Image (cartoon, rainbow, N blue to C red):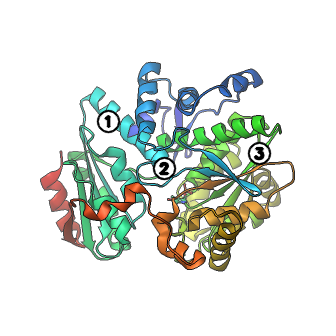
Amino acid sequence: MKYISTRGGIAPISFKQAVMMGLATDGGLLLPKSIPEMSAEAVAQWRQLSYPELASAVLSLFIDDIPADDLRALIVKSYQSFNHPEITPLVKQGDCYIMELFHGPTLAFKDVALQFLGNVFEYLLKESGGKMNILGATSGDTGSAAIYGVRGKERINIFILHPHKRVSPIQELQMTTVTDANVFNLAVRGTFDDGQAIVKTIFNDLSFKEKHQLGAINSINWARIVAQVVYYVYAALKLTASENVPQVDFAVPTGNFGDIFAGYVARRLLPGQIRRLILATNANNLLTRFVLNGDYSLGAVAQTSSPSMDIQVASNFERYLYYLNGEDAERTRQDMDRFAASGSLQFDELAQERVRADFASRSVNEEETNATIRDFYKLHGYVLDPHTAVGVKAGLAGREAGVPMICLATAHPAKFGEAVGRAIGHEPELPESLAHLAEKETSCEVIAAEVGAVKAFVEQHAL
Ligand SMILES: *Cc1c(COP(=O)(O)O)cnc(C)c1O
């Protein structure tokens, strides 16, 4: 499988090259040249497979430059760190199925992709004799998944900036209790935006970037998307068989459009089996306006109880736009230029019809989120985290008889204990992996919110 850019500015490259490139060098996003469509016979065979076996089958459609045995070993290693035998189990709760994506080491769905990406990076760097220094900023939630993805790996160091004293105690401990020699937690005296601006500035210093082989671990890497395709396929095949129905729906709490884009790929892989993807947003409803009215225009970012979805510009949206534009890279480039200049894109009725064939959408406000957590707990005794609750609300509202609704649970409720506590009257019980964090040794450097200070630290500790 070769990879191309949504903006058409690069010659086709291999999977390995695509992983190491991350963002396409023409500013676009990388996509496989084609998305295969599975035959009914192939799908029937897939139904017999365990999660790791299915992952091997799905990933090998998109990865043909890593030997099958090596790919399988990378997958097995990636999911050994999960604490559930099914990796992403489905549990029926009332009128929906909850797909629990939070059984990885940091209790968030990002582990599914980042455990795999970390292993792929290590494998490719070993092969090439290279090294990588990963630099990133987090507002609290995603930093730990990135850190756990590469902790203890050879040829990789990771530097993660978080805003000093502005992340929750659990979030801070999840990061700082990782004391592996290749992990550097930097608590920046400033806000998340300060940290993000510093990282951006450093990445724009091309000679520094080159010298230290700086790498990013953000959600635009194709390897992350493809790892997420697997659980959609897994759940769709499982439920269509056990419920004896032709199709299922998914409800997806959405921020950067990475997770739901993986659902879109799965939908194309399995013709007819995934009816619709319900794109759930919180108060940051740009993508909902896009689905409902063809209006893709920037608003201000609002803070909510589902912070990982407090996003306006969804970094993976361009991937879908490319398909919406009939795989026309030139048109996609023009659209993205227009959006960069004006902060707005408007889609005509024809495009809107196509979008609505792929997606339904709903924006869920804070009150509804809170009420959903409360009511779901009352009815089923099951605790939803706020992100998951946004998806459940949108999913239950969009449900149709005879089509099982699978709601993606993207974080364990204990990670957002305060918001959950407000809804159900008490904070959720801490799972084993979080309960003893406070007793562990920590490692973290407090640092000034200055590009120079961070650069100097990286310079000193880079591989
Ligand atoms: C990142 C994240 C999301 C949003 O996923 P995208 O791929 O960015 O759309 C939803 N919920 C949680 C808990 C997350 O960490």
Specify whether tag 1 is near ligand 1 (CB below 8 Å). Answer: no
Q: What element carries label 3?
A: strand
Q: Where residue 321 sits: x, y (%)?
A: 64, 51
Q: Nearer the viewer, residue 66 or 100?
A: 100
Q: Residue furthest right?
A: 401
Query: Residue under circle 2?
Result: 220
Spatial CA distance of label 1 from label 2 is 18 Å
* Neighbourhood count class around disc 2 (C-alpha, 10 Å): few under 14, some 14–19, many 20 upward: many
Q: Which of marks 1 and 2 is nearer the N terminus?
A: 1
- The image quadrant that residue 271 belongs to is top right
Given the image, on which type of amino acid does mark 3 rest? Val
Which amino acid, by three-letter code, is at mark 2?
Ile
> Residue at the spot x=68%, y=28% of the render?
47
Residue 204 visible, this angle: no
Instruction: Classify residue 361 as left or right of residue 139.
Output: right
Q: For mark 1, what is the residue?
A: 122
Mark 3 highlights which residue?
A: 248
Label count reads 3
Please state which amino acid type lies under the numbered disc 1.
Glu
| Mark 3 vs mark 2: in front | 3
Looking at the picture, does residue 93 appear above or below residue 140? above
Question: Where residue 118 sits in the image (x, y, percent)?
Answer: 37, 41
Quarter of the figure with residue 233? top right
Kindly identify which numbered label has been placed on residue 69. none
